Amino acid sequence: MSSTASGRNGTWRNWGGTVAARPAREVSPASVEELAAAIRRAGEDGLRVKAVGSGHSFTSIAATDGVLIRPQLLTGIRDIDREAMTVTVEAGTPLRRLNAALAREGLSLTNMGDIMEQTVSGATSTGTHGTGRESGSISAQIKALELVTADGSVLTCSEKENPGVFAAARIGLGALGVVTAITFAVEPIFLLSAREEPMRLDKVLSDFDELWAENEHFEFYWFPHTGSTNTKRNNRSAGPEKPVPQLRGLIEDEILSNGVFQVAQWVGRAAPAAIPTIARVSSKALSGRTYTDIPYKVFTSPRRVRFVEMEYAVPREAVVETLRELKAMVERSGLRVSFPVEVRTAPADDIILSTASGRDSAYIAVHMVKGTPYQRYFTAAEQIFTAHEGRPHWGKVHTRDAEYFARVYPRFGEFTALRDRLDPDRRFQNDYLRRVLGA
């Protein structure tokens, strides 16, 4: 199976192997008109509709037993407006292709996540993000979008046109309609200098505010059962370009980051008692490096090891305390955690269901390798995150429901009211949306 989700015998499965669904039928529309017709026909047949991207969500947000829309024919760049500095792209375009196409045009997104396999609509509909002091999620860079609603009509939304829909649909969870095109803000391509180096966890936590304030993009990985982290600082650079040499990149990114890591995961699964020792060895194997390259080559990295993930956004000022509680929990629980904990940040934005909506946020992500029991670890972590009014990533494992979200999202009622207006018959409903948005 490639890094996109696959189907066998009419069964759709997600990338992490956590969700399977058997749709009544699959449609791959080649135009917005064909998509609108497919949605109208589903309505006539009394079937629900879900569009899927690359299946990178760990939740069942894209699962349906109705009509499954595959957007692989709705790809490519529609328009580049160099005056407005925007690019309009079809919804099924993978981020990998968008990044490469923009680079050829001398353009770039301002910020991005660390994986490029998702489609632009899948990534934005679930709130995919990287890390940034001033620059937010991929959705926060949207200037306009095109949406096909439940009755088959096509809505264009921006700050000027249908602004109420725009405030919600940039992270719409697939609940408001099917996104068919997105207009992103872009800028002339620039260089980023990356500085990766190990650092003691207690130092990262005591200096967190300074590390955040002094860097445009700061993130770190903490290795449970150790006091070690690997930090990454990305800042704009005047150059010169100094990419990671190809051989060194192969050794570090593929053999060490993916290959050795995969072996460590296998050993950890076979002999969980060895995990703390493996973690100490792994964290010591990391050495520092610096390199300078165009943005997508610095922000993104290959992910070959399959995993399951939970990630919560907590208020940025609560991140250090939350991490200390997480570390204490792992130490007293007897859990064996072989996967690093990832910590990133985002500034407040104005998107209704964005995990950074209305508040500066820090993200804490916990992972387990695919096939390993993760429930006890994730449950204990989730209790810590929710005590800080954490908001879970919409595409990652969590157990929260509409009642909880109404508490942690001040504008939650605005979203559900808009959904009532755009999709009164719940054409885009599934079990996941019923849980997180209410019936």
Image (tube, rainbow, N blue to C red):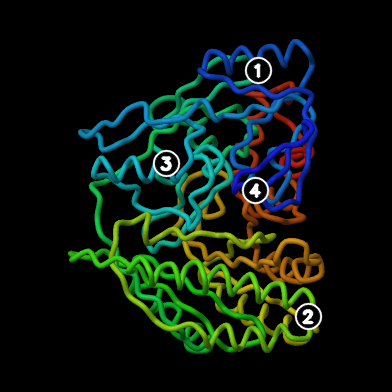
Residue 135 lies, with reference to residue 4, above or below; the image says: below
Residue depth check, mark 1 versus mark 3: number of the one nearer the observer? 3
Q: Position of residue 297 (x, y in %)?
A: 37, 58
* Contact, mark 1 vs mark 2 (Cβ under 8 Å): no
Asked which quadrant contains residue 303, the reply is bottom right
Q: Secondary structure at mark 4?
A: loop
Q: Is residue 122 above or below residue 179?
A: below
The amino acid on which the numbered mark 3 sits, given as a three-letter code, is Arg
Image x and y of residue 282, in percent:
58, 83
Residue that numbered label 2 is attached to: 272
Dot label at residue 57: 4
Q: Earlier in the sequence, mark 4 or mark 2?
A: 4
Marks 4 and 3, how far apart at CA: 19 Å
Distance CA(mark 4)–CA(mark 2): 27 Å
Element marked by disc 2:
helix
For marks 4 and 1, the one nearer the N-term is: 1
Disc 4 and disc 2 in contact, CB within 8 angstroms: no
- Mark positioned earlier in the residue sequence (1 or 2): 1
Q: Amino acid at mark 1?
A: Ile
Mark 3, residue position: 97
Count of numbered circles in the view: 4
Q: CA distance from mark 1 to mark 3?
A: 27 Å
Q: Earlier in the sequence, mark 4 or mark 3?
A: 4
